Amino acid sequence: MPLRSAQWYGGQDRNAYIHRAWMRRGAPADAFTGRPQIAIANTASDLTPCNAHLDEVARSVRDGVHEAGGIPLDLPVVSLGETNVRPTAMLWRNMAAMATEEMLRANPLDGVVLLGGCDKTIPSLLMAAASVDLPAVVVPGGPMLTGTFRGTPLGCGTDVWRLSEEVRAGTLSQEQFTRSESSMIRSRGHCNTMGTASTMALVAEALGTVVPGVAGTPAPDSRLLEAAHGTGRLAVELVSDDRRPSTFLTKGSFHNAIVALAAIGGSTNAVVHLLAIAGRLGVELTLDDFDRIGSRVPVLVDLQPAGRFLMEDFHRAGGLLAVLREVADLLDPRALTVTGRPLVDHLDDAPIWDPEVIRTRARPLVEEGGIAVLRGSLAPDGALIKPAAASPHLLRHRGRAVVFDSIEDFHARVDDPDLDVDADSVLVLRGCGPKGYPGMPEVANMPLPTKLLEQGVRDMVRVCDGRMSGTAYGTVVLHVAPEAAAGGPLALVRTGDVISLDVEARRIDLEVPAAELAARTPSRATVEGFADPWRGWQRLYVDHVQQADKGADLDFLVGSSGSQVTRESH
């Protein structure tokens, strides 16, 4: 099969001359004849601190591509740092995917190695690869090493939420809180908890897009560079075998990803990302699949925020393959990986080395801990909750709503000593969905009112149309669809209304008669809290973004356009 890049470099006409001459710059003539051109799509950026080390990883990929006879080509792509980007990195996930897709299609490339780490980078790269459908493989950047403070391991993200609440409760001084800052980030790499970055790396492996056994390797570990080198060699093989995403990513692949998501106690954010990736591939995947496949799967990984340990421990204990071996009977045995072999074929030699970190099937951390999908009068199209990170006594709850019309309204009033709230109240935050914010930020795990923290309260039922960090915890109902800004019932809730939650029954209901609800209209404060950008990406996003239950992709980006380019540039 002729290489795609030959459409640029083959022949003797003026256009072929231009393409070769400008790319030559010291390269031998045979660089353009029969040697696969492999892009290294690199999300390294100083402003994405979790990905700052990916240039080093790229060098190892480059060596592997060269060794296998390919031509490696650096391709910097849009990088989204969860900790810095405002108003939320999720606003640009689709833009990053679209830009990467277009650059892969527009250039003389035969395959691509995708380098990501921080939350939105791996999802955006996989969305792009699925849409352009060139041979592609992911190298996750890996988690950081464990930092300690006062002799105690720190989970990045998770302990930010915990320690900041202790400051507000008066049990930790501001000075001590600030001192912990330098201990939180010990090394290169992304969050060391089972946050979205770790989750998406592991889920990408379960999906089949990472060489089995690589995801979860700590960023400073030299074995990550060894794996990157091997992945570079594999990328050349993928081109030779024409092994594109559409040839091995099936409904069974997503089945395995959902089982893995549940077994590792992964981030709720994986749901919107997997839905979006499936949409690019034309694989039918719905919220109900996550509940049907994953909700009864036991959580086997004792990792923050649902458990005790951190990613360095997880890697030492056997990693993802050891987890999947415990639930092998729940996996689709036919689903292939980027290696060309089924995922289950890689599980034979995957022992658990530390049964405290990775539990056996007979001794799970949580018997049924997968992400639960809720429906009801408050979320007709669905909402999510992560039972493993919630308080068991709140999984069935009934309380009066305390409503906040925007994140600004929340920050202005949550610590008001006169706020009419108690431990049984249900905190409701709206205007934080894909359209309303815009971009669906990680604000659903609302800080608790100070006066309740001072009383010893550490969790409450919270309801929001936004997301929460995968490092967060609590009894949080999130991704409510339709969101308030799209006409969902959340826009009509009033303070004092009763909300009932029953996770076992998969219900979240607003106890207001249907006739009364139909007669209500959103308050002025609610509507004024919705985003209304007048230009640029934000305008395009608000006009075209889908709801959370569809993956929050843009409606015109769903599906694949392939790699064909029909017109020359000169």
Image (cartoon, rainbow, N blue to C red):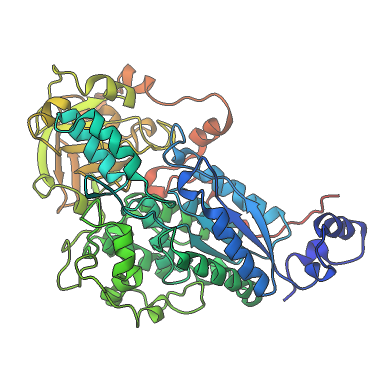
- For the point 61% across and 46% down, the residue is 99
Q: Position of residue 392 (x, y in %)?
A: 11, 50
Would you say residue 556 is visible in this rendering? no
- For the point 29% across and 33% down, the residue is 178
Q: Position of residue 337 (x, y in %)?
A: 47, 73
Reply above or below: 424 against 18.
Answer: above
Q: Quadrant of residue 136?
A: bottom right
Would you say residue 568 is visible in this rendering? yes
Q: Would you say 487 lies left or right of 113 here?
A: left
Q: Position of residue 491 (x, y in %)?
A: 30, 29
- Rendered-image quadrant of the N terminus: bottom right
Q: Would you say 513 lies left or right of 553 here?
A: left
Q: Nearer the viewer, residue 511 or 553?
A: 553
Q: Would you say 226 lies left or right of 460 here?
A: right
Q: Would you say 47 lies left or right of 179 here?
A: right
- For the point 39% across and 62% down, the residue is 216
